[in-house]
Image: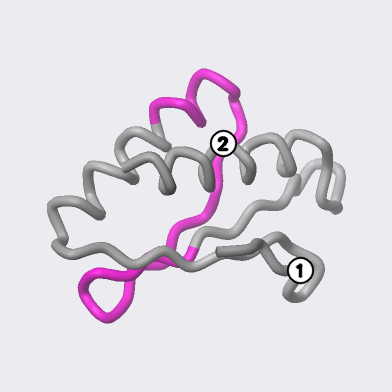
Amino acid sequence: MEWIVKDGKLVNTFEFKSQTALAEFILKRAKQADEMAHHPDYKIFKAFTVEITLFTYSKKAITELDQTLATHISNTFSER
């Protein structure tokens, strides 16, 4: 799955086999986001799908921090 730029923000969608798996994935991402002090936006739909949006609101742009987090999220999703 590749990240796309949509409305000036990095966006990707991830599908899971259960809501538990989805929730565990988001919890791990949230802990990392807290450590980085950089938080994605999450939109859960169709019960097992999450859309993640990355954007640095303080800079009003996609930054290197967004790119780094996107890479980490993709790598973590692939490893599960």
Three-letter amino acid code at the position of disc 1: Val
Q: Distance of mark 2 from mark 1, alpha carbons? A: 17 Å
Residue 18: give its label. Answer: none
Q: Can you tell which quarter of the image residue 9 is in?
A: bottom right
The residue furthest front is 79
Of mark 2 and mark 1, the one earlier in the sequence is 1
Which residue corresponds to the image point at 73% horizontal and 74% vertical from the top-left? 6
Three-letter amino acid code at the position of disc 2: His
Q: Position of residue 3 (x, y in %)?
A: 66, 62
Instruction: Give the quadrant of the C terminus.
Output: top left
The residue furthest bottom is 46
Which residue corresponds to the image point at 24% horizontal and 69% vertical from the top-left? 48
Residue assigned mark 2: 72
- Judge left or right: residue 19 versus residue 56: left
Residue assigned mark 1: 5
Q: Position of residue 37 (x, y in %)?
A: 59, 25
In this rendering, is residue 77 above or below 2? above
Q: Position of residue 59 (x, y in %)?
A: 86, 43
26 magenta-colored: no
In this rendering, is residue 80 above or below 62? above
Which residue corresponds to the image point at 18% horizontal and 64% vertical from the top-left? 17
Mark 2 crowd level (few <14, some 14–19, many ≥20, 10 Å Cα): some
Tell me the magenta residue range.
31-51
In this rendering, is residue 67 above or below 2? above
